[in-house]
Image (cartoon, helix red, strand yellow):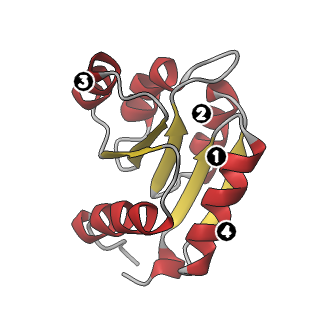
């Protein structure tokens, strides 16, 4: 699957974090289709855009990533979720793994780690029909 055929939604309340993710992903021709600053808006956008991958921050105002994760998994089982977090708290990570994330990216970011993690998820995705 070509990178430009992989649609990615960024859900993070930090403008700089979203910008870094956007720049890094676009440097490898991934298709960043939308951005949201909280879990509720992220869920709405995800339902509208149906992205292949949702990069979801854990700590956000209004609705956190962990609060919206079960809804995403239920309503968009075909989307892959990568958790974006500064927390190395094993309980948080364990909770996210049990909820069905497909990987996580720790802050502060390393561009190559972001790309390697996304490429690993893409490699396991089934090609789109059509």
Task: Name the image quarter holding the N terminus.
Answer: bottom left
Q: How far across and how far down the image is residue 91, in percent?
A: 28, 16
Q: Is residue 105 left or right of residue 58?
A: left
Above or below — where is 16 with respect to 37? below
Q: Nearer the viewer, mark 1 or mark 3?
A: 3
- Circle 3 residue: 94
Distance between the alpha carbons at the discs numbered 1 and 2:
9 Å
Q: Are marks 4 and 1 in contact (CB under 8 Å)?
A: no
Residue closest to the eye, 37 or 105: 105
Q: Nearer the viewer, mark 1 or mark 2?
A: 2
- Badge number at residue 23: 4
Which residue is most to the right? 15
Q: Secondary structure at mark 3?
A: helix
> Badge 1, how many Cα within 10 Å: few under 14, some, many 20+?
few
Among the two numbered marks 3 and 2 on one chain, the one whose residue lies closer to the N terminus: 2
Instruction: Look at 72% across and 38% down and name the residue there.
Output: 14
- Badge number at residue 126: none
- Total number of numbered discs in the rendering: 4
- Circle 2 residue: 43
Among the two numbered marks 4 and 2 on one chain, the one whose residue lies closer to the N terminus: 4
Q: How far across and how far down the image is residue 83, in percent?
A: 43, 39
């Amino acid at each position: 699957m070509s990178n430009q055929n992989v649609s990615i939604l960024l859900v993070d309340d930090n403008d700089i974090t979203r910008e870094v993710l956007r720049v890094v992903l676009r440097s490898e021709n991934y298709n960043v289709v939308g951005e949201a600053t909280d879990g509720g808006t992220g869920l709405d956008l995800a339902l509208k855009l149906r992205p292949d991958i949702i990069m979801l921050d854990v700590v956000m105002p209004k609705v956190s990533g962990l609060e919206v994760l079960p809804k995403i998994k239920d309503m968009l089982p075909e989307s892959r979720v990568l958790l974006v977090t500064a927390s190395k708290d094993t309980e948080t990570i364990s909770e996210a793994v049990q909820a069905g994330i497909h990987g996580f990216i720790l802050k502060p970011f390393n561009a190559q780690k972001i790309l390697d993690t996304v490429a690993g998820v893409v490699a396991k995705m089934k090609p789109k029909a059509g």
